[in-house]
Image: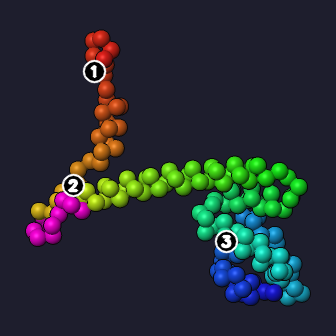
Amino acid sequence: MKIGELASLTGCPVETIRYYEREGLLPEPARSASNYRLYAGSHAERLRFIRHCRTLDMTLDEIRTLLDYHDHPRQPCNAVNGLIDEHLAHVEARIEQLQALRGALVALRSRCSGEADSSQCGILSALAQPAAEEITAHRESSHVPGPHGSH
């Protein structure tokens, strides 16, 4: 099948298929006499595997590792478990970051009722102030210990 047919079959854009080829995730297909790429069913299966991994927000390096285990089925799968455990920890950390972001946005939103001119907007005023991370970083970088080494 040609690349357009593979794209239709898998729901994957043509440019993404070409990208996965360049990245070495998809093997290079055979070529027709007129130099068209000719894909097999194995390409569609591999592309579905890659796309499933991408829906789980896995990186290309993680996908490469999983494909290596998939392609060499005699390897022990404990490393696959480890990769998933690491990815899960990453996802959990991102969830915590997103919850903190949500809290910051809720607090920011509570600063404005929308009743005044934008010159009086509490959100705009708060955004003009340094972020808490900037203040903390500045304090830590400019800290000079007192005469007894304490503050």
* Cα separation between marks 3 and 2: 41 Å
**Which structural element holds mark 1?**
loop
Residue 126: mark in rendering: 2
Q: Nearer the viewer, residue 58 or 96?
A: 96
- What amino acid is labelled 2 in the image? Ala
The label number, if any, that marks residue 9 in the structure image: none
Q: Residue at x 80, y 57 (%)?
A: 69
Name the residue at the top extreme: 148
Q: Position of residue 111 (x, y in %)?
A: 18, 59
Residue 124, above or below 10:
above
Closer to the camera, 71 or 78?
78
User: Is 118 in the magenta?
Assistant: yes
Residue 90 makes an appearance in the image: yes
Under circle 2, the secondary element is helix
Quadrant, the C terminus: top left
Q: Look at 30% across and 33% down and name the residue there.
A: 139
Image quarter of the N terminus: bottom right
Note whether 119 is above or below 38 in the view shown: above
Q: CA distance from mark 3 to mark 1?
A: 54 Å
- Which residue lies under the disc numbered 1? 151
- Mark 1 or mark 2: whose residue is earlier in sequence: 2
Q: Magenta: predominant secondary structure element? A: loop
Q: Residue at x 17, y 63 (%)?
A: 112
Q: In the figure, is residue 114 to the left or right of 60?
A: left
Question: Over which residues does the magenta segment extend?
Answer: 109-119
Disc 2 residue crowd, few under 14, some 14–19, many 20+, Cα 10 Å: few
